[in-house]
């Protein structure tokens, strides 16, 4: 526990952000959580050794991939060291005295606004993008703009002295965000293991099929496949997650077989899933 209390782990936003919640779920309550202004700043803090690890959202079950972080993983040499799926409970929060019927605007991160889009339409509330859910909560608390609330966590509301006007405002009861860590892995047991890859293939019939066949032919499940554009028009890098650790002979053989069918292939991490 003494070692854990000294560990410094970065996240994007202000204290009370969901990234900090994920961080503490992974590294424990005594970790030193270091706020960073942007996702890029989290990567830079890890790369420069100012923090031992960073926690980043990469996918929302409602809003889809957090493409900025997918691209940052491709840009940097840092490897994924763990993964956590966090249940997200959004609240509409406001300064004391503001009632729900008077709310005309809600500040939050674009992903959070997307996850609550139906609720906001029904209430006739205008969504306004901010850098982070906790940043939105702090802004509403400190500046108290007229008829303005924030969508954030209950923890943020308590931290910044806000009133919870309504809880569970996300559009789906199965709202989760997938977070990954880069840098030092959390000291905990894992439910399962995954390996993440990034690769490019020739623009020809069957090229992607040959890569996927390396995994399906060995009975391995590909749990995620998405493409990201490269600098040249209409050329893509593919991101793939496969269940299993790189230490597993089947996974290693599949990766080697896939590499033979690729122009480039890079392992983004082989890691535990909480």
Image: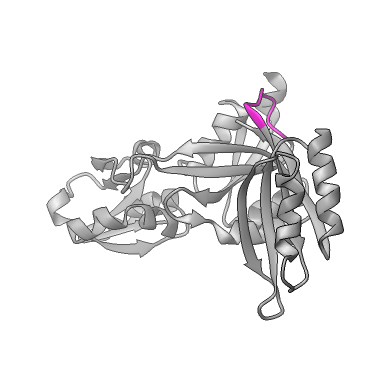
The total number of labels drawn is: 0
Q: Between 189 and 97, which is closer to the camera in this rendering?
A: 189
Q: Residue at x 33, y 45 (%)?
A: 172
Relative horizontal placement of residue 198, taking residue 15 as reference (left or right): right
x then y, percent, for residue 212: 71, 53
x then y, percent, for residue 238: 68, 61
Q: Residue at x 75, y 40 (%)?
A: 218
Of the 4 image quadrants, the one containing the N terminus is top right
Relative horizontal placement of residue 12, taking residue 133 as reference (left or right): right
Provide the major secondary structure of the magenta segment: loop
Of the 4 image quadrants, the one containing the C terminus is top right
Q: Please identify the quarter of the rendering in which residue 2 is found.
A: top right
Q: Residue at x 70, y 65 (%)?
A: 237
x then y, percent, for residue 263: 83, 65
Residue 104: within the magenta? no
Q: Please identify the quarter of the rendering in which residue 244 is found.
A: top right
x then y, percent, for residue 137: 37, 49
The chosen color scheme is one colour
Residue 189: within the magenta? yes
| Residue 59 sits above or below residue 125 on the image | above
Q: Between 197 and 182, which is closer to the camera in this rendering?
A: 197
Query: Magenta stretch?
Result: 185-192
Q: Residue furthest left?
A: 101
Q: Residue at x 66, y 22 (%)?
A: 189
- The answer, for residue 78, to whether it is visible in the render is no
């Amino acid at each position: 526990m003494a070692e854990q209390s000294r560990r410094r782990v970065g996240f994007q936003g202000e204290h009370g952000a969901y990234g900090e919640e994920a961080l503490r779920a992974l590294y424990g309550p005594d970790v030193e959580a270091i706020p960073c202004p942007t996702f890029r700043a989290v990567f830079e803090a890890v790369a420069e050794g100012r923090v031992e690890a960073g926690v980043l959202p990469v996918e929302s079950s409602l809003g889809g991939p957090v493409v900025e972080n997918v691209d940052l993983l491709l840009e940097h040499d840092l490897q994924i060291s763990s993964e956590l799926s966090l249940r997200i409970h959004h609240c509409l929060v406001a300064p004391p005295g503001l009632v729900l019927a008077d709310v005309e605007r809600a500040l939050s991160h674009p992903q959070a606004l997307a996850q609550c889009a139906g609720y906001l339409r029904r209430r006739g509330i205008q969504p306004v993008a901010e850098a982070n859910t906790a940043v939105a909560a702090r802004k509403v608390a400190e500046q108290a703009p007229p008829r303005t609330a924030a969508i954030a966590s209950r923890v943020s509301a308590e931290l910044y002295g806000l009133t919870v006007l309504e809880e569970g405002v996300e559009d789906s009861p199965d709202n989760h965000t997938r977070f990954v860590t880069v840098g030092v892995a959390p000291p905990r047991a894992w439910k399962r293991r995954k390996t993440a890859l990034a690769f490019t293939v020739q623009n020809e019939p069957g090229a992607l099929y040959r890569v996927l066949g390396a995994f399906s032919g060995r009975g391995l499940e590909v749990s995620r496949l998405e493409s990201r554009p490269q600098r040249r028009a209409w050329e893509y890098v593919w991101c793939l997650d496969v269940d299993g650790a790189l230490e597993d002979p089947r996974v290693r053989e599949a990766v080697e077989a896939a590499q033979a069918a690729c122009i480039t292939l890079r392992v983004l991490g082989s890691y535990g899933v909480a």
